[in-house]
Amino acid sequence: MSKASLNPHLLSKAFIGILIWICSISFVQAQQQITKKYSIADGLPNNSIRSLFVDSREMLWIGTENGVSVKRNQEFLNFFMEDGLAFNSCWAITEDKDRKMWFGSYGGGVSMFDGKHFHKIQDGLYTQFIRTLHTFEDYILVGTTNGLNLIDYKNLSVTKVQGSQGNEDHNFISGFFVYQDRLFYTTYRNGVFEVLLSDGTFTAEKINDFEYIYGLHQQEEMIVLSGKEELLHFNADNLISKNPRPERVEPSSNFYNFQKTAFGLLGTATGLYSPNGGVFEISPNQVTPFNDRLQIDSRNLWSMAYHTASSTLYLGSLDKGLYEVNLSKRILLFDTKGVEILGFAGDDQLEALLRSDGLHFPLLSKKLSLTDFKTVQQRYFANPKAWIPKLEDDFYELNPRLTAEEIIFYGIRKHDNSFWINSNIGIYQVSTTGNFIRYLPLHSLVIGFSPDGHLIESNPYGGLRIYTDISNPKNYQYYRADLPETPDMLSQIVQKNSKTYFSSVFAGLFRLDENRFFSFKESGIWDVEKIKSIYPTSGNQLIVGAEFGDVFLITDEEDFKEVLKIAKSTIYGNSIIGVKAFRDAILIMTEQGINIYQNGNIKLIDAEQGLRKTIIKSYKIIGEDLYLGYEDAYLKVHLPSILSDSYRSYQLKITKLLVDFNPFSTDKIEWFSYSLERIILKNFPSSLLIQLQPHRLLYPEKLQYRYRLSPDQEWTPFSTSNEIFLTYLNYGDYSLEVEVFDLHSGKTEYFNLLEIKALPPFYLQTWFIILSLFLAIITILIIFRIRISQIKETEAVERKIAETKLEALRSQMNPHFIFNAINSIQYFILKNDTDRAVQFLSKFSKLIRKTLDNSKSNRIKLSQEADYLRAYMAVENERMANRVQWDVSLDSNLDPEFIEIPPMLLQPFIENAFVHAFPASIEKPKITVLFEGIDQGNMSCLISDNGIGISEKTNKSHRSRGLELVSERISLLPNALPDAISIQSQERIGTTIRVKIPVITHGPMQKYVQK
C-alpha cells in the first residue's frame, strides 16, 4: 500500500465507515441463521480461504493458502502440488462449459481438473500470480497481477491479450463484466479496459482511468464497485464512459466478493485500514453488518459462494476457516447468552418469553426481572391482612425468604388475555402489557384451569384445589390425594372444549367434567401410565405421549377410542419430552430432536437441520411457528416450511472400492466416485469394501442403509454406516441392491448399485474341469485296478487272521471242557461206580465227537447247536446225579434249519451254572436255555438258573475265563453289538444271562429278518 493512501481524507472516511458499522450493529435483530463452522480440525487443508465456488455438480470447491479442497457432504477431499496442482495457494476458481474446473494460484499459474487428473498451464502466462478467473465463450479469462491471458479450454492453448500489461503495483485485474455483448475488465489502479478481437488478435483498450477497484458485482445494467472503504453504484453506460461518476457512494469496508442470495446482495470484506471487515447486506440505501445475524466470528472475510437449491451461503475467512450458513427462514436461532428458556406464550405471535432471568415481552421491548417478581411477593407478605396458606392444610411448601436469585420458574400459560406464571415463590398473573395483576402465595409445579375458567393448583404429594373465586383464594374446593379419582404427580393440565385433562407420570390420564374427576385407569377404560405430555388437536382428539413409551391419538367424546398408536420402536429417542400437533402432523419431541409423524411416516429434525444438540427445555406452537427453548437459546421453527419440504431425488455414488483390501482401478474414478455398472472379481474367494456417498442431498447424515445381493435374498438390517463389507464372496453372479431411508423426508429410495461377477478359481473353469476329468478317469482306472488287487489280498489276509484267531479261541475252550469232563469220569471211578462210569464215558465220547465236528466249522445250524447243548447238559447233569432240571427251547418264529450261529458260544455259561450255581442247599435246581427272536442281525439267547446267584463282591473280583473268551470271540464277529452279553443276578434267587449272537439267516428266516 502506498503512503499516499493514508491521507486525512481517507482516514475520515474510514472513521465514518466504522461509525456506521457500529451503529448498525445495535439495530441488528436478535434472530440468527443456523451456521456451521469448519477449520483444519475438521479436515480443511488451511484456515485461510481465498476462493469458493459451487459448480454445476453442486460440489463446493475451496481454494486455500495451502491446497484445494472439495466438500463432499461432511468430509473434505484435499489436493496439493503432489497431486498435480500447479501451486498450493489458490486465489481463484471457475468452471468451463465442459464442466471442467479451473484453479488460479498465487505463484504457480493455472491448474485444470478434468475429473480424473490435474493439468498445469504455466507457459505463456504474463505472470504466475493469478487474482481472478472468468469463463467467457470458449475461453478462460486469466486475470494476473499484471496482464490478461485467455486459455482455450478445449486445447489448453494460451493467448496473451496485447496492451493489458502496465505498472505491476497497480495493474492486478479485479473483475470482469459483460455489457451489450462487450467484454470489460477492471484493475486495481490502472483503469477500466475493454477486450477487443481483431484479425485473430486480442487486445486491451483502456476505457478510463478509474482506480481503486477491489472487486465488482454486476446485476444487469447496474454495477457495484468496491473502492477504498466505499461502495460505488454505477450504471454500466456510466462506468464505461471516459469520465465515470457513481450514482451513489456508501462508506464501507474493502469488499472483495459479492453474491446474490435469498437475503439480497451480500458482500465479504476485510479490514485493510481498520477492523471493520465481515459480511454485509448491501441494499439500495445502506450497508448492514450481518456477522451477528449469520453467527460469523471473523472480521476478515475474503471469499463467498452460494448454493441456490439449499439456500446455503459459504463464507471463506483468512483466519478462521469456512462458514456454512443456512439462509432459509425455516429455523431461526435466538441466542440468549447462557440464559435458560422456560416457556413461551402468545396467540398468533410470541408475546411473552419466560427466561430464567425473568419475563420478557419481545413485542413491547419490556422485561420483568427477578427483582420485580420478588418485590411483588414482598409487598404481599407485608400486608397483615393477606391470606397465607398453611402447610398443615396440605399446601406445597413455600419459602417467602428466598432471594430473587433463588427464584425458579416452572412455566407460563396465557388464559383470559393475561399470563399466568407459576414459580417456587408463588403464582403470578401478568397483563399482556407487562404489568402485575395478581399474586398468590401458592407453590405449585403444575397449574391449569377448569372448564369454567377456575384456577387449578396442584400439590404433587397432596391432592389439588380449584379456586372458584380467585379474588378470594380462601374459597376453594379441595380434592384429597388418597382418593383414586384425584390426579396427583401431574406433568400437564390442558383444556379441551368443556373438559380439562390431567396427565400423571404415575397414574395415567384424568378428566375433569362438571366438577367431577374421572380416572381412565381406575375406571378400566385405558391403563396407560407414566404420561409425560398431552395436547388437544384442532379436532376432537387428544395426543398423549407416554414418558418412556408410545404416543397415542385418542378421542373422548361420547365414547373413548384409541384412534392411533405410534409405537416406541418407530420413534427416534428414548424419552418423550412433549407432543404437539400442527395440521395433519403429530410432533414428538425427544432428546434426539423432533419426530414428525405425517401420513404414516416419521421423519426426524435434529442438529443436522439446525436444532441444538442439548435437551429441549420448553416448547410451544404459536401461529405457524414452533418455539423450542434450550438452556442457552431458543429456536423458531417455521412448521409449514418443514412439513412442505419438497422431496429432492439424489444420486448414490461409490466413492471407495476395495477388492481384497486393495483399491480398485483408479481409471474408473471420475469426479471422486466410481463410474461403473459391473465389476469382475478374479480371485476366489474375494472380499469387497464399498463406501457410498449421496450426491445432491441436503442432509446426508440422515440416511440409513440396507442391502441384498439378489432379489430372492432377505435385506440386511438398516444401518447408519455408509460402508458395505462383503467377505469371502463365493463365485457366481450378484446384483447389489441398496435401499436407503431418509430420516429427513421419511422417504425410501432403491438403487441397483452394482453388478458383481465373481469368477470361479481356475480349477473350477470348464477347460480345467474337462482336462482334470480326463486325467482323473485314467488315474482312477489305474488306481482302481491296483486297489482291487490290494483289497483282495488284504481281505484274504484279514480273513485268515480272523479264522486263525477264532480257531485259537476254540482250541482254548475245547481243552477246558475236556478237562472238566475227565474230572467227572474220575469222580465215578473213585466211587467204584463202574457202570455209571462206562455209561458216562459213552455219552462223553459222543459229546466229544460232536465237539470235534462243530469245532471245525465257523458256523453251524441252530438245530445242531441246540442238539449239542442238550447233549452237553445231559453229560453235566449226569455228573451231578441228575438233580438239575434243564431245558433247551426255541421261539416258535425261529426255524433252526435256516439259522447259522458260531458253535460253542453258550457252553461256558451253562458250564458255569452247573459248576457254581447249585450247592447242596439249592433244592430243585433248574437251568433253561431259550433262543428268542432276531433283531439287527443278532439273535438273543436267554440262559437262566435258580441257583445261588453271583454276589456283588464275587462279581467284582471274579470273572470266568470262559466268559472272557466268549466276549472276545463275539467281538470278532461281523455285526457284533457292543453290549452283546448282559448278566442279571440276585443272591439266593438266580442268574439270567442274555447273549446277543450275530447270525446268518437263509430261506424263510431271511424274510423274517427283513421284516
Image (spheres, helix red, strand yellow):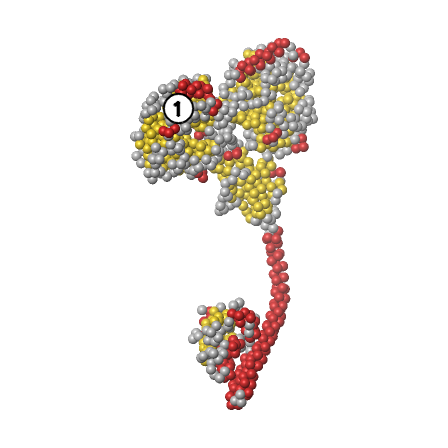
Of 159 and 85, nearer the camera is: 85
Residue at 63%, 64% (x, y): give it.
782
Q: Is residue 653 above or below residue 638?
A: below
Q: Residues within 10 Å of mark 1 (few under 14, many from 20)?
A: many
Q: Position of residue 531 (x, y in %)?
A: 40, 35
Q: x, y (%) of residue 977?
A: 52, 68
Q: Is residue 1003 visible?
A: no
The quadrant of the picture occupied by the N terminus is: top right
The residue at which mark 1 appears reads as: 441
| Residue found at x 57% / y 49% | 731
Q: Nearer the viewer, residue 556 or 371?
A: 371
Between residue 961 and residue 890, name the one nearer to us: 961
**Residue 38, how many percent across, how many down?**
58, 28
Using the rendered view, name the quadrant where residue 290 is placed. Answer: top right
Q: Residue at x 38, y 23 (%)?
A: 388
Q: Amino acid at mark 1?
A: Pro
Outermost residue toward the top in this view: 8
- Residue 146, placed above or below residue 501: above
Disc 1 is placed on an element classified as loop
Q: Where in the figure is residue 231, as x and y percent of width and height?
A: 57, 15
Q: Residue at (48%, 33%) from the top-left corner?
A: 591
